[in-house]
Image (tube, helix red, strand yellow):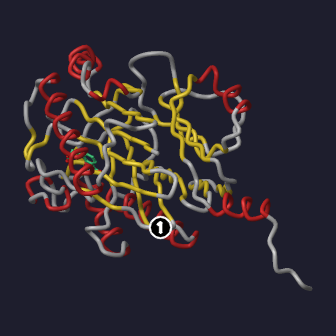
């Protein structure tokens, strides 16, 4: 067969199909969700709910977190992309893949005969195996949720046990540990299993530190026998967009907590930390994300809902208030921390 010229239309189609996915992450009012999905051409990859049960069925994994929303009408976090999505679900693990990245979740019920470090180890080992097998070996972003985060379990705080198991799995299996560690969040839910939500790429991402804070994976042992395995931010770039994932950020300077008991001051310190990471992204990567994002969403985890006015007051008139800010009631990984803020900024 003789074919030397490729028609223009085919070339265009090829170029489009080879380009990378465009990500969208939005908070959508639960009431409007079925209609919003039906009206959109975007392909849903995951829906995250906060203390709400959705009625109806959805074409992608629904990840239910018992982290009650403390402000505004109930929303769901909806992850979509413009590429075809392939979904695999079994009883404890669900993943959605689009060729560029995978979003997944693992929920493991805790068992009386097993401590949280072993449960965390199993969850992380399963997650890593899943993403290697699926061809998305680069961990981009992780969210860790489990109940009673500050309770003691056989002489060690549950958060610290979680850190031990997470560290063991990642140190064993993750290539270039610890510099390849992704941005993460660890927050205490009201109830539920150990739930790990993860984003992994077919291509590597850049992981950033914060000059105001020690890398968490280098914390001294005062905060537990194994350090928390995460980076302050992760940056992914494709030919179409740039995404900055800001890890859960708290009132921690160096490695010490600041402003115990003072929610407004903790929020101000946290925002300074976020600003420092954004500056870091700007200098390291030449990006002015805060000035130009096409999308910016923030989750503010609040330990005591009574501090909402102070925390909200501290966010007002900062660059964060230009994004969509969601306030959730959850426990944080040090007793004295009252607020933690994570972010997701998309530009391009
Ligand atoms: C800190 O800076 C605050 O263990 O995955 C923030 C984000 C925190 C993630 C985690 C912990 C984690 O140490 C706590």
Which quadrant would residue 149 be assigned to in this image? top left
Which quadrant would residue 237 be assigned to in this image? bottom left
* Residue 97 at x, y percent in the picture: 61, 58
Return the residue found at the far bottom. 1
Q: Nearer the viewer, residue 194 or 347?
A: 347
Q: How many marks?
A: 1
- Residue visible at 47% across and 36% down? 65
Q: Nearer the viewer, residue 94 or 277?
A: 277
- Residue visible at 29% across and 71% down? 177
Q: Nearer the viewer, residue 299 or 114?
A: 299
Residue 28 falls left or right of residue 341 = right
* Residue 109 at x, y percent in the picture: 47, 50
In the displayed structure, would residue 343 be above or below residue 97? above
- Helix, strand or loop status at disc 1: loop
Viewport quadrant of the N terminus: bottom right
Return the residue found at the far right. 1
* Residue 136 at x, y percent in the picture: 52, 67
Establish whether ligand 1 lies closer than 8 Å to the Cβ of label 1.
Answer: no
Label 1 packing within 10 angstroms: few (<14), some (14-19), many (20+): some
In the displayed structure, would residue 344 be above or below residue 73? below
* Residue 77 at x, y percent in the picture: 52, 34
- Residue visible at 42% across and 62% down? 139
In the displayed structure, would residue 263 be above or below residue 291? above
Residue 19 falls left or right of residue 164 = right
Q: Nearer the viewer, residue 139 or 237?
A: 237
- Residue visible at 43% across and 51% down? 242
According to the image, label 1 marks what residue?
A: 203
């Amino acid at each position: 067969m003789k074919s030397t010229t490729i028609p223009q239309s085919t070339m265009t189609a090829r170029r489009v199909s080879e380009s990378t996915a465009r990500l969208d992450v939005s908070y959508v009012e639960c009431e409007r969700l079925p209609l919003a999905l039906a009206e959109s051409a975007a392909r849903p990859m995951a829906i995250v709910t906060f203390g709400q049960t959705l009625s109806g069925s959805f074409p992608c994994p629904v990840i239910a977190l018992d982290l009650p929303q403390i402000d505004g009408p109930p929303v769901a976090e909806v992850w979509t992309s413009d590429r075809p999505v392939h979904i695999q679900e079994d009883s404890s693990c669900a993943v959605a893949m689009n060729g560029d990245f995978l979003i997944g979740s693992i929920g493991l019920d805790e068992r009386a005969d097993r401590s949280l470090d072993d449960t965390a180890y199993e969850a992380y080992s399963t997650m890593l195996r899943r993403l290697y097998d699926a061809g998305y070996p680069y961990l981009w972003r992780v969210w860790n949720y489990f109940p009673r985060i500050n309770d003691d379990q056989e002489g060690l705080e549950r958060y610290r046990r979680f850190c031990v198991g997470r560290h063991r799995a990642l140190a064993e299996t993750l290539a270039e540990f610890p510099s390849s560690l992704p941005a993460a969040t660890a927050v205490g839910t009201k109830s539920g299993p150990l739930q790990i939500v993860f984003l992994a790429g077919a291509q590597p991402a850049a992981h950033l530190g914060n000059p105001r804070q020690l890398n968490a994976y280098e914390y001294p042992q005062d905060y537990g026998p194994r350090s928390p395995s995460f980076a302050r931010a992760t940056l992914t770039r494709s030919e179409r967009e740039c995404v900055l994932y800001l890890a859960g950020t708290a009132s921690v300077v160096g490695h010490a907590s600041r402003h115990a008991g003072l929610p407004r001051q903790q929020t101000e310190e946290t925002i300074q930390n976020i600003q420092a990471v954004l500056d870091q992204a700007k200098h390291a990567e030449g990006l002015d994300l805060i000035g130009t994002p096409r999308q910016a969403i923030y989750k503010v985890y609040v330990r005591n809902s009574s501090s909402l006015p102070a925390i909200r007051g501290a966010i007002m008139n900062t660059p964060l208030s230009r994004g969509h800010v969601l306030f959730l009631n959850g426990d944080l990984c040090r007793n004295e921390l009252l607020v933690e803020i994570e972010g997701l900024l998309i530009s391009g």
